[in-house]
Image (cartoon, rainbow, N blue to C red):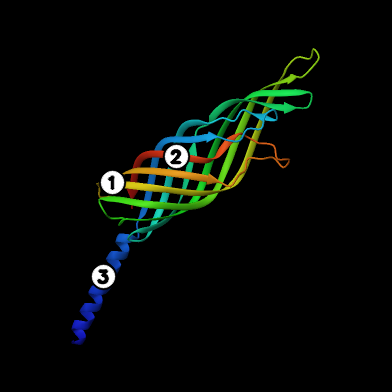
Amino acid sequence: MTRIGATRLALCAAALSSWTAAAWAQTFVSVAAGASTQAEGASDQPYLGPPFDGTSGALVAAVDRAAARSVAFGGEISLASAISGEQSQRAPGGSNVFVSEHRDTILSATVKIGSPLDAPAHVAFVLGGGVAQRHMTRSGAFNPGFGLRVSTPFSETLNDWAPAITLGVDLAVSLARRAALFGAARVHALKDDDRLPDGVVKRGVSSTIVRLGGGLQLNF
């Protein structure tokens, strides 16, 4: 092979490598809206109960960077509106009766592995880890256990952080060169036993969350 031929071959290889890297080195921005479901947690009456469950609106938003043709790394936020339930709690001299409103917000770093990112339909399995903010508000009244004392207003806010593991599946179906329909399914498992230091149930809401949604994905 002549020197000129070798040089041309090297230039072609470099161009192909650059084109391939450019094809893979894409950023994907995805948003899916849908529903979030949580089951009942533990019950600990008369200290706290009953447990409650619920379904509410949810949103999953992610930003990912392709690392190879079938692998992407990124981060996402998974959030939902509050679920609510009526509960009561033993208190000194009586009991608190209130409505609890609870929501979990999860921040995760993720890796996604699946079919080629540039395929017309792309499916990826999602594995992530991060933290969850567990936020609950309680609003109601304190009822004395004896005597003629009247009820008094009661309110309380619980705000905690817990480690979280995220498992899920993404589906993207191409609409145009840089846009695709997007679907997401997530299971968030929070490392939170929902107990106070003395062993009493703290909230009565499950630490496992299922979220499903659909929306749009853009790539740049």
* Element on which disc 3 rests: helix
- At x 52%, y 45%, the residue is 189
- At x 18%, y 87%, the residue is 2
Residue receiving disc 3 = 15
Measured in 3D between alpha carbons, the distance from the residue under mark 1 to the one under mark 3, in whole angstroms, is 29 Å
Image location of residue 192, percent across then percent down: 60, 44
Mark with earlier residue (3, 2): 3
The answer to whether 137 appears left or right of 144 in the picture is left
Q: Residues within 10 Å of mark 2 (few under 14, many from 20)?
A: many
Look at the picture and state if 144 lies above or below 120. above
Image location of residue 184, percent across then percent down: 39, 43
Image location of residue 158, percent across then percent down: 64, 36
* Element on which disc 1 rests: strand
Query: Is the residue under label 1 in contact with that under label 2 (CB below 8 Å)?
Result: no
Q: Residues within 10 Å of mark 1 (few under 14, many from 20)?
A: some
Measured in 3D between alpha carbons, the distance from the residue under mark 2 to the one under mark 1, in whole angstroms, is 20 Å
Q: In which quadrant of the rendered view does residue 142 lie?
A: top right
Mark with earlier residue (1, 3): 3
Kind of residue sitting beneath label 1 = Val
Residue receiving disc 2 = 211
Q: Nearer the viewer, mark 3 or mark 2?
A: 2
Q: Check the image and name the residue furthest to the bottom.
A: 2
Image location of residue 107, percent across then percent down: 51, 47
Q: In which quadrant of the rendered view does residue 203 lie?
A: top right
- At x 50%, y 30%, the residue is 54
The answer to whether 211 appears left or right of 90 in the picture is left
Mark with earlier residue (2, 1): 1
Q: Which image quadrant: the N terminus?
A: bottom left
Q: Residues within 10 Å of mark 3 (few under 14, many from 20)?
A: few
Residue receiving disc 1 = 173
Look at the picture and state if 128 lies above or below 43. below
